[in-house]
Structure formats: C-alpha cells, structure tokens
Image (cartoon, rainbow, N blue to C red):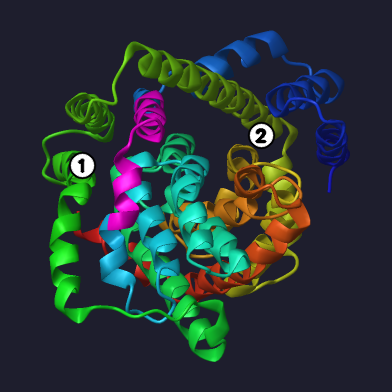
Amino acid sequence: MPLPSIVAILSLLAILASGAWVALGLMGVGIFSLEVFRTIPVEKLLAQSIWNGISSPELLALPLFILMAELLFRSRFIDGLFSALEPWVRRLPGGLLHTNILACAFFALVSGSSAATTSSVGRITISELDGRGYDRRLTVGTLAGAGTLGFLIPPSIVMIVYGVMSQTSVLKLFTAGIVPGLLLTACFMTFIAVLSKLRPGIVPQGTSDNSRIWRERLQGMPSLLPFVVLIGSILGSMYGGIASPTEAAAVAVIVTIVLMALERSLSLSVLKAAAVGTARTVSMLGLIIAAASFLASAIGFLGMPQAVAAFINGMNLPPLGLIVLLMLVYIVLGSFLEGMSIIVMTIPIVMPLVVHAGYDKIWFGVFLILMVELAQISPPVGMNLFVLQGLTGRPLSSVVRAAFPFFLIMLCFVFFLAVFPQVVSFLPKLL
C-alpha cells in the first residue's frame, strides 16, 4: 500500500483514539495528508467539498425527520402503545416481551432514529415488565436489539445520509429496508418465543380471560391511531407519488404537531425543547457530513481507494468472502466509532469494491445500515447501550451481556442477506 495511504490511516486512527471530535479529526487528516503528499490548493478543495457535501436537496429531509422524532419523544403517544399491544401478544410464547419488539418496530416507522426508539419505548416498558415479574436481562436485551430497527425501517435518518453520499435514490433505499426490517423483527420475536419454551421461568405464568381478550384488543385500537396516521402520511405520500422524501418529511412534521395539539401535549416549552434537540443533532451530523465529504475528496487525490481495492483484489476473495471481511472490519470499527461516522468514512473506499463484487448500491446500503445497527449495541461506544444504562441504572457490562444474543441474531441476519441479496432488491425493482 502506498505511503500516503498508510500515513492517512495511521493519522486517522491516532486522532480518533485521542478522543477528538470525529468531524475535526476527518478534516485534520485530509488537510495534513494533502499538505504533505500533494501540491494542490487545499483550502479551495476544502471549501468546495464542504459545500458539495451539505448542499444536496435530499439532506433537507434530515432535520425534518429529526424534528419529528424529537416531538414524538416528548409526546404521550408511546404511553398508549404498550396497553394497545399487550392484548395481542399476551398469549404468545414470551408474553409481553414481544411488546418491546413490536413497540420499537411501530416507533421506528415514524421516528427514523435508533436512540430515540430505544429511549421512548424503554421508559415505558421497562417499569411495566419489571412490575409483572419478567426477566430484566431479557427486557433490556429486547430493547437493545429491537431499538436498532429505527435505522432500518423507513423513514431512516441514516438511509438519507447514505443515499446522499452514494448518490442513490432515497425512496428506493426506504423501500429496500421494509422486508429486512420486518424479517429482523420476526427473528427477534421467534428467538423470544423459542427461549421462553426452553426456559419457562423467564416469563411469569399468568391467566388470560379469553372472553375479554377481544374486547381489550378493540379498546386499545384508538391508541394505535396516531401511529397509523403518521405511517400513512409518510409512506402513503411517498409511495403514492404525492411527495418526495423531503416533502414527506415536512408533511410528517405538520401531522405530528396537529396530533400532539389534539392530544394536548403540545406547548411552547415542548416546541422549544424539540427545536433545540434538533439543532444539536443536525449540527453534529452536518459537521460530520461536511468533514467526510472533504476526506473523501482527499483520499481520492491520495489514491487510497485504488490502493485498498488493489490490496483486497490481490487476496482473490469470492464475493461472499469480501462481505465476511467487511463484516469483521465494521464490527471492529463499531467498537470505537458511532454509526454515522462509520458510514461517511468508509463509503468512498468500500463502495467500489462491493459494486465490483456484483452487489448493487441499494443492497450495500441495507448491509451497511445493519452493520451500523450492530455498532449501536457494540461496546464500548454503542449508543443504545448507554441509553439503556441510563434507563436501568445497571452497569454497562450487564447491558452488554443482555444485548449479546441479539447482536448474534443480527450478525446471522446480515450473513443471510449476503447469501440471498434478492430479499433486499426485489421490492426496489418494482418502483
């Protein structure tokens, strides 16, 4: 591998290990490498790359979906979700543990954020399940695993960033995430059902009045109505050809505000808190995207993508072998980097390799998002782990052990999609 590429990689690892801001680290590595190894006007490339990186029209959807997630986090919609789902899952093997998984899937359909999904569902269900005698470790584990669905099930904030950086249709990415998201939800629920049969003690034994169950189910349906309306306004407007993803995000924010006003949970203080939270998140993401755009240009001038591609091609790996290698690399990166940083750092290098191996950009987007989901529950920096530690007060090591079975399930699921890529690609081809 050429010396400039080696120096750039080592410099990046050193900066990240120092605890510096990821965005400033990316910019610093690009500036240092170009100043040392190339004679080009770095300041002009920096300005042009930043402008190109953050001026994409598709990025307008990002702050809107984040604002919607911030508003939903402060609403009371999630409070009624548990009681609405309870009668439907009570008699399943695993009982109310399934409410964690289904509630996360419902919230993921409207939030687009993994941390927001985990926190919003967990603050309601943890105390409920504890009070009913459910195994705390499984309660935490289901939240850790299912909370990551916020990235995979559309609309997804991470999908928007990937679509912009890879120049891929965001609408097709949203479509590609539907079937894998539903299948992964089913995998989590199947695991809970099988485990409860093998270890009956993890689920409290209770009685269910069959004569009342359908009445309870019908009584809980109004609590699902806000989610149905939001899902319909987002997905319906996009797939009905009425709105683009950006316009659908604006519609979703308006619908959320109207629903919260009808629910009487909307106030100036809630709007202010949601706006401040959105500004903080968007500022962080914008800085990372701008820095990553510059670094992508810089490593192109350094010849790093070609050098890495030549190195891996020299290994003569079959397509599936390349995916396994990338899985190992992303697991290692997920141990010390958060998901968004992983995406923006690796796309310029890895994308040509994957396309050359025969996988398309849509499939790779879902693969990459699943690897980012794994990073959400990978110690020591997995965001979902910290969210659950704050909700439960348990040591981080305990949360990691609870999440580990779901980490393995997701890992096997990624390998399944690598063997059967048509699971991801068949729906987008219909558009």
Q: Main secondary structure of the magenta part?
A: helix
Q: Is residue 56 visible?
A: yes
Q: Which mark is residue 215?
A: none
Report the residue at 15% width, 39% height from top: 237
- Mark 1 lies on a secondary structure that is helix
Report the residue at 40% width, 43% height from top: 156
Q: Is residue 169 visible?
A: no
Find residue 201 and report its image quarter. bottom right
Q: Is residue 413 left or right of residue 43?
A: left
Percent of width and height locating residue 8:
82, 35
Q: Which mark is residue 300?
A: 2
Q: Is residue 44 magenta?
A: no
Q: Which residue is under mark 1?
A: 226
Report the residue at 82% width, 30% height from top: 19
Compared with 172, 427 (above or below) is: below
The numbered mark, 2 or 1, whose residue comes first in the sequence reads 1
Give the residue type that dot 1 points to. Answer: Pro
Q: Nearer the viewer, residue 396 or 365?
A: 396
Give the residue type that dot 2 points to. Answer: Gly
Percent of width and height locating residue 238:
19, 41
- Mark 2 lies on a secondary structure that is helix
Percent of width and height locating residue 72:
35, 34
Q: Residue furthest bottom?
A: 198
Find residue 324 and report its image quarter. bottom right
Q: Please name which of the two marks, 2 or 1, marks the residue nearer to the observer.
A: 1
Q: Residues within 10 Å of mark 1 (few under 14, many from 20)?
A: some
Write the start and end of the magenta stretch as one range: 61-83
Report the residue at 53% width, 69% height from top: 134
Q: Is residue 74 magenta?
A: yes
